[in-house]
Image: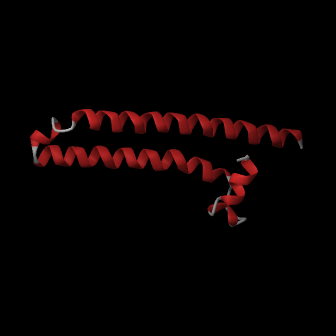
Amino acid sequence: MTREEQLESCNLCQNRSFNPAMCFSLRSLALIIGLIVYIAVMLLLAFLEPSSIINGIICKVFIIYSLVYSIKTARSEEAKIKKTSVDLLDEI
């Protein structure tokens, strides 16, 4: 799928007053919010029941690692898109 097709398929981009670049930056924001909520829930459960820290520790570490890796990947993709859009504007 090309970048133009992605922009056309994005519901937020259908509104012409909306900046299309925001569609791509929302990925990392959603992942960051998800990571914060997950950690907050795990801390709350640890406060209410301390033995829950040990239960499923491998899964918890894997989920946190996956979210952090996804945030890192999303940010690098955002940087590539931003660089590409700046290059296109320089050509005009």
x then y, percent, for residue 42: 23, 44
Q: Work out which quarter of the rendered image holds the C terminus and state it.
A: top right
Q: Residue sitting at 68 percent across and 56 percent down? A: 19
* Above or below, 83 relative to 32: above
Tell which of 83 and 38 is nearer to you.
38
Q: Residue sitting at 55 percent across and 39 percent down? A: 74
* Above or below, 61 relative to 36: above
Q: Residue sitting at 66 percent across and 50 percent down? A: 21
Rendering quarter of residue 76: top right
Name the residue furthest right.
Answer: 92
Colouring scheme applied when the structure was drawn: secondary structure
x then y, percent, for residue 13: 67, 61
Tell which of 89 and 5 is nearer to you.
5
Question: Left or right of 53: which side holds 68?
Answer: right
x then y, percent, for residue 77: 61, 37
Tally the marks.
0
Tell which of 66 and 12 is nearer to you.
66
Tell which of 69 and 19 is nearer to you.
69
Question: Left or right of 22: which side holds 69?
Answer: left
